[in-house]
Image (cartoon, rainbow, N blue to C red):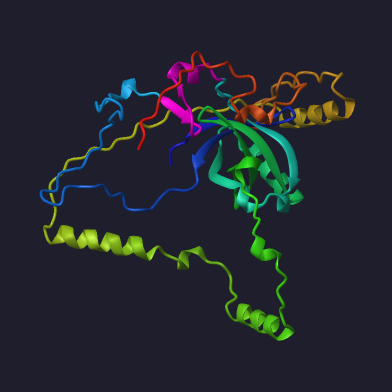
Amino acid sequence: MRAVWKGAVTFGLVNVPVKLYSATEDHDVSLHQVHDKDGGRIRYQRVCEIDGEVVPYQHIDKAYDDGERTVIITDQDLKALPAERSREIEVVEFVPTEQVDPIRFDKSYYLEPDSASNKAYVLLREALESTERTAIVRMALRQKTRLAALRVFGDVLMVQTLLWNDEVREAKFPSLDEKARISDKELELSKQLIESLSGDFDPEQFVDEYQQELRTLIKAKLEQGDAIDTAATFGEQPEKEEGGEVIDLMEALRQSIAAKRGGSDEKPAKASKSTAKSGSGAAAKPAAKSTAKSPAKKTASDGAAKPAARRKTTKKAG
């Protein structure tokens, strides 16, 4: 796997250097469109609806349409918006794991220790597991502020990006307002049926039969010579490895707790570097942050510069 992000998990003065890896991948066979007569590849052109011209990519802007008016958003407008490039996975709070409903999970990532020692990583993992807590974190991924859940998955730490609250639809169905009469016998039979189909979940026993059959079909066509010669080249550059700084983990933990008990007026002393023997894998932050970052960075309205220019465009009917 190739790391898609490097940074550190931070809580208090504790700093845990990590690498981020995508935990899932799409297994669907990639297909494209061709001309049935000669197998020629079908390509799409970007055509302007007003003048009918093919528009080069460098002359294409984005736009928002509210049904009556269209606002053009240029690259300069987007660059004026605040971009997130922080390399921190900032812990906002630790919550009971059962309070984070799975409907909010978006994409999953594995965290790997990126330090000379994995002690701080393992300590955080065991602390979360023993307290049955999940860390709600804020992080910047692909220049966007994201809310995520940091939890234990087997022997590794996992970050799962969360949908924002307004992205989860309310489950409101009038048909459920009608009271249904369920007899004791019907409920008992339903329980018996559930019991007869009960078992332990084993994901390996479930396969995507459609994709398997599609691969079998492709293999058969290749073996029969029913194919057209194509050339493709794929390459991937190896990523340079970087290690984290080794700092005294115990000192960082003590100062974080002391700062929490003493209030924001007291500034804890700077944590001293340990010898290679300590090998904690944690780094101390110079001072506790006095203000929390606002999760409202998701919207462009707060703290964003006004677009350079807004132009109304007419839409062609039909």
Q: Residue furthest top?
A: 308
Residue 241 visible within the image = no
Question: Foreground residue, 149 or 62?
Answer: 62
Task: Examine the image and state in which quarter residue 136 appears.
Answer: top right
Q: Is residue 87 left or right of residue 219?
A: right
Q: Residue furthest front?
A: 317
Task: Examine the image and state in which quarter residue 18 appears.
Answer: top right
Q: Is residue 112 left or right of residue 218?
A: right
Question: Foreground residue, 277 or 43?
Answer: 43
Name which residue lies at 74% across and 38% down. Answer: 93
Vertical side of 84 occupied by 3: above or below: below
Split into 4 quadrants, where in the image is the N terminus?
top left
* Magenta span contains residue 63: yes
Residue 198: horizontal and vertical position, in percent?
A: 60, 75
Split into 4 quadrants, where in the image is the C terminus?
top left
Q: Residue furthest bottom?
A: 185
Vertical side of 225 occupied by 17: above or below: above
The range drawn in magenta is 62-81
Residue 307: horizontal and vertical position, in percent?
A: 52, 17
Question: Foreground residue, 207 or 275?
Answer: 207
Circle count: 0
* Magenta span contains residue 188: no
Name which residue lies at 40% across and 25% down. Answer: 314
Residue 234: horizontal and vertical position, in percent?
A: 27, 38
Q: Is residue 132 left or right of residue 209?
A: right
Task: Examine the image and state in which quarter residue 157 appears.
Answer: top right
